[in-house]
Image (cartoon, rainbow, N blue to C red):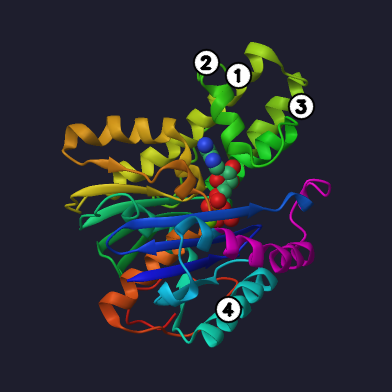
Amino acid sequence: MIILGIETSCDDSAVGIYCSERKVLASVLATQLEHRATGGIVPEVASRAHLRNLPPVLRAALEDAQLGPEDVDAIAVTRGPGLLGSLLVGLAFARSLGESWQRPVLGVHHIEAHLLANQLEREMVFPAIALVVSGGHSQLMLLRAAGDYELLATTRDDAAGEAFDKAAKVAGLGFPGGPVIERLAASGDARAFPFPVARLSDGGLDFSFSGLKTAARLAWEQEAPLSGQRLADYCASLQDAVIRQLLDRLARSLRGHEVRACYLAGGVAANRALLAAATEMLTPLGIPVHAPSPRYCTDNGAMVACAGALRLEATGESGSLAPFPRGVLRSWGAAF
Ligand SMILES: Nc1ncnc2c1ncn2[C@@H]1O[C@H](COP(=O)(O)OP(=O)(O)O)[C@@H](O)[C@H]1O
Ligand SMILES: [Mg+2]
């Protein structure tokens, strides 16, 4: 089955093509630079940019895969969570392709697409534990199978990616913060700044990154501007604090669950220091840790196509195409 995936939940206009037998055939993305000037995403600007970007991105994806519309069996599109206007543009685009190509259109949950991005480059095994960390989400999930999910923990306030993005913003390092902080952290000392790891008073598994965000801002303001080695130390300490919290929850989430693998997913999973630390922690327990290649960790169309293909092949159902700005991931069969 060859399936085309469309992702427009935030500020990336992406189209990917996935084939069940041959994996990723194309993954093309237009990142919106329009938001640089405003220092944050303006929803109205994002919707208009998707409208402009999608036709050329689609053409480039078909060209890369050397396919025509007649070769595509179905179209998958992100229904949510995300910015409502951006989702609506992607959904309208997918529907019109479906109409003109006479193909089914499936709505996909963005978090499920991130999770199943792990299937793009290797066969996933179950049951598994998954850590989904991005600019908008931090979740721990038990995966009994593709389509069978149990949410174990979420964030009480901010997402892991936000800690990277806000720290980068106060330090004037641009957006998104994750990649530049990871690069600078490589030559820094993670013990230089004593950034905290939040512990919840109820001892629960949920994440909390707002305290770290504030600590990073205060540390910066006390010494600003940091540069050279001190800036590298700042980045290393921040990255280490994020990783320590993620690993603390990951380790505790395993209690009582027998799993065959651990999957990292979402933009923050592009961080190879996180992958290395999780691998070091779980390998002695006999649990292999996997993350997609960095380009499939951050938002992309191939992961949407893959999630759509797995569901369509397993259930034959295309489901609703109503957008939802918020909403937890449910298992296949449960309405979402
Ligand atoms: N190498 C990296 N290390 C840490 N964080 C990263 C890295 N690459 C990207 N990120 C973070 O991932 C987030 C984007 O995740 P993504 O899934 O693409 O978007 P969204 O949050 O809109 O779903 C941003 O917060 C960004 O800083
Ligand atoms: Mg995402």
How far is the residue under mark 4 from the one under mark 2?
44 Å
Q: Secondary structure at mark 4?
A: loop
Which amino acid, by three-letter code, is at mark 4?
Pro
* Residue that numbered label 1 is attached to: 232
Residue 152 found in image quarter: bottom left
For marks 3 and 1, give the one nearer the viewer: 1
Q: Residue furthest right?
A: 37
Q: Residue furthest top?
A: 229
Q: Is mark 4 within 8 Å of ligand 1?
A: no
How far is the residue under mark 3 from the one under mark 2?
19 Å
Q: Which mark is residue 16?
A: none
Q: Look at the magenta stretch and give its main secondary structure.
A: helix
Measuring 71% from the left and 31% from the top, which residue is drawn there? Answer: 173
Measuring 69% from the left and 62% from the top, which residue is drawn there? Answer: 53
Whole-percent x and y of residue 312? 33, 77
Left or right: 238 as drawn, with respect to 146: right
- Tell which of 69 and 113 is nearer to you: 69
Neighbour class for label 4 at 10 Å: few (<14), some, many (≥20)?
Answer: many
* Residue that numbered label 4 is attached to: 323
